[in-house]
Amino acid sequence: MAQHIGRVAAVTGAGSGNGKAIAEMLLEEGAQVALLDIAGDSIAQLAHDHANAVAVEVDVADVESVRAAADRLRSEFGHVDILVNNAGIVRGTNFGELSVEEWNEVFAVNSTGPFLVSQAAAPLLEAGAAARGARATSAIVNITSVEAHIVISSSGHPQIHYNASKGALHQLTRALAVECAASRIRVNAVAPGFIETPFTRPVLGNPEVLAWLLERTPLGRVGQPQDVADAVSFLASDKASWVTGSTLFVDGGWTVY
Ligand SMILES: NC(=O)c1ccc[n+]([C@@H]2O[C@H](COP(=O)([O-])OP(=O)(O)OC[C@H]3O[C@@H](n4cnc5c(N)ncnc54)[C@H](O)[C@@H]3O)[C@@H](O)[C@H]2O)c1
């Protein structure tokens, strides 16, 4: 399938895990892709391997860095059709000991980052939709989490700041869907369950946790980055041209229970 031919996409956190799979899928489907990541070496190889990929080092939590990245996108492509706010971090500290510094660190990347990048990219996304005709739309896809909706912390999962930051991103998605509709920018979220990436490897490497997880997942397997990429590809495409403010759960049925 080549449903993104001629489109320009920007993917944050493209150097690893879900972001890498999303970037590779959009490339495969014909898009030109800007790979945005704080870890420059992680995106350099991917950019080297793909003629249609450009590596842009950025800290999504830093205003100046995001402005510079948007300037680079403007000079490189002139517009953007698809923005995927995927960069995210998790930290594990119990509520009682959690410092405000760690709370702010997680919010800066997971909630403020998507706000800053969306704001900087909005004129480029509006230009992308306008260039494709009167009814065309551009797309922002935010990678939230099932943990924006449910709390797994009671089982010894010390990440209230992750829960809260992803909850904020969930509501940012809905607010921006309303805010950006007049600019013909659709804004949706993909909420993954446990996906096998460097992010979750320490947890999934524990056989007890893995068994617990599989028991609670109706489809009986751990998710793969490709599962997330497939959902993003749909929401970013014209097949979703009347979908905005929605969340697509990619969790093997975890949140159905
Ligand atoms: N893996 C899962 O099970 C899972 C589940 C639900 C949601 N998610 C979400 O998916 C997204 C990607 O997770 P992953 O598992 O691929 O993680 P990962 O750690 O493998 O990749 C995250 C990427 O983001 C980059 N990054 C971190 N901070 C950044 C910053 N300030 N600016 C720019 N880039 C930055 C990292 O360098 C890395 O390349 C995250 O938002 C995460 O919350 C993951």
Image (cartoon, rainbow, N blue to C red):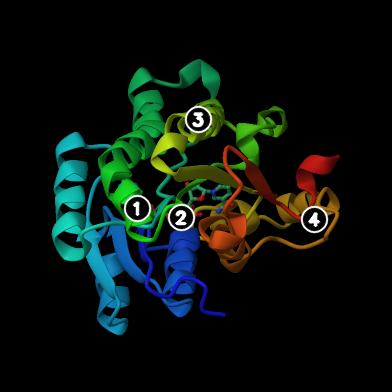
Give the answer, above or below, for where 45 lies relative to 202: below
**Disc 4 crowd, CA 10 A, few/some/many (<14, 14-19, 20+):** some
Residue 158 place in picture, x, y as percent: 57, 31
Earlier in the chain: of badge 2 and badge 1, it is 1
| Element under disc 1 | helix
Q: Is residue 108 left or right of residue 187?
A: left
Name the residue that disc number 3 marks.
178
Amino acid type, residue under disc 1 in the picture: Ala
Evaluate whether residue 93 shows in this view. no
Amino acid type, residue under disc 3 in the picture: Val
Name the residue that disc number 4 marks.
214
Name the residue that disc number 2 marks.
136
Q: CA distance from mark 4 to mark 3?
A: 37 Å
Q: CA distance from mark 2 to mark 3?
A: 17 Å
Quadrant showing the C terminus: top right
Earlier in the chain: of badge 2 and badge 3, it is 2
Q: CA distance from mark 4 to mark 1?
A: 45 Å
